[in-house]
Amino acid sequence: MTEDAIHRTVEAVWRMESAKLIAMLARMLRDVGEAEELAQDALVAALEQWRANGVPERPGAWLMTTARHRAFDRLRRRRVGERVGEQLAHHVEAHGDPGGDPAAALDEPIADDLLRLMFVACHPVLGTEARVALTLRLLGGLTTAEIARAFLTTEAAIAQRIVRAKRTLAEARVPFETPRTEELDARLASVLEVLYLIFNEGYAATSGPDWMRPALCEEALRLGRMLAELIPSEPEVHGLVALMELQASRAAARLGPGGEPVLLLEQDRARWDRLLIGRGLAALARAEARGEALGPYALQAAIAACHARAAVASDTDWARIAALYDALVQLAPSPVVELNRAVAVSMAFGAAEALGLVDALAGDPRLAGYHLLPAVRGELLQRLGRAGEARAEFERAAALTRNERERALLRGRATGCDGGD
């Protein structure tokens, strides 16, 4: 095998196995920073030894066994008192000595470890940006450079963010464990928020030259599916997975030949991914089957399902979408949800009725600088024949957005407003 092929193989194995590896090491060492360090050591060892001896039959098991050996060595060196010695003895008793069959390393309770790692990486003690970066690093296996490219920042900024996050976790003595029952809802909400933020940044990039960043959508969806397997009893987990599956199903139709945005009502629905739609509807059914009132993510998934079930745009049940937004406003009130509700009202009951709803949001400081407020207002004004006002709104929206593709779209909408009122 060539040097380049070895590198590609190691990278592929790392992407598949790194989360399991770090999760197992974090359970042993009770320190996420140390766990990642030893996982990286195992990766370097793989590069050296696989180059010389070839790729083993079970590369994941090889990495796991190598990492466990190094973790045991570190625990032995760290043994400066009886407490640490007891920790090592307890681990050996519970999990056995690291020698023997390499495949045995894969028999550890990896699912539990992954769930614990997810809760640690998304711990509320960390800021939002830190939680996102750490999750992509520890659970996604992304390099610092890949995360930096995804969020259009420097490697140094991401590296510093990750280092600070791990230091904060250590200083706060965040335990490597699944939260207790009384803490579970709040901690799970933090995990879901991180996955939602990662997906949304991929689905509609806030800045930069690209309308979408599919790799982030794929990573959020992969982690969401993993979480649904780890906690199958939580309806909102299935709700979020349903939402991401259904939104991701439109990805191919959201971009024109030159990478320009294609809005929902103009998309070729034959290009929507039917497999992802089926998976999304099935996940939504699992959320609904719990018999509980739908949470915010499941409600958004139900809205996305209305679009997915419409063969053509004119078949969309906008009255149901407006009603679902009514429920969402009651459950998770925010001006952005109110704005989305106004769009649904405009499609179900007319632009004039919706314009009053949008105008009522104009003074909300939380929407100051939010480009979609003037964009929606411009759309409504255009439909009402008030072209001059619509043009001004589209131009204002274009000036506010930081995404180059969206800016071009909005400027085109402004140019398309022909004549005055």
Image (tube, grey):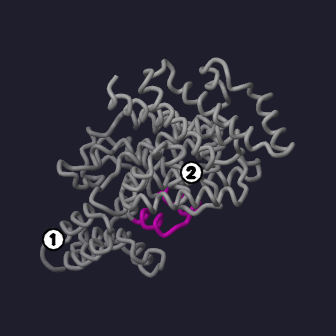
Instruction: Write down the residue under mark 2.
Output: 192
Q: Quadrant of residue 94?
A: top right
Q: Along the line of sight, which residue is nearer the eye, 192 or 358?
A: 192
Judge depth for marks 1 and 2 and give the one in front: 2
**Majority SS type along the magenta span:** helix
**Disc number placed over residue 415 in the picture, else none:** 1
Q: Taking 180 as reference, is 326 above or below it?
A: below
Q: Is residue 3 left or right of residue 278?
A: left
Q: Along the line of sight, which residue is nearer the eye, 153 or 268?
A: 153
Tag 1: residue type? Answer: Thr
Tag 2: residue type? Answer: Leu
Q: Residue at x 59, y 47 (%)?
A: 236
**Residue 30 percent coordinates (x, y):** 71, 45
Task: Work out how far the residue at label 1 is from the one at label 2, CA to CA, in angstroms.
Answer: 40 Å
**Residue 421 percent coordinates (x, y):** 18, 80
Instruction: Tell which circle, 1 or 2, labels the residue nearer the N-terminal end.
Output: 2
**Residue 155 percent coordinates (x, y):** 42, 58
Is 340 magenta? The answer is yes
Q: Residue at x 43, y 32 (%)?
A: 10
Residue at the outermost right position: 82
Q: Which residues are magenta?
A: 323-342
* Disc 1 element: helix
Q: Along the line of sight, which residue is nearer the eye, 148 or 221?
A: 148
Q: Residue at x 15, y 71 (%)?
A: 415
Is 159 magenta? The answer is no
**Disc number placed over residue 2 in the picture, else none:** none
Q: Residue at x 61, y 25 (%)?
A: 106
**How many neighbours does mark 1 have within 10 angstroms: few (below 14), some (14-19), or many (20 or more)?**
few
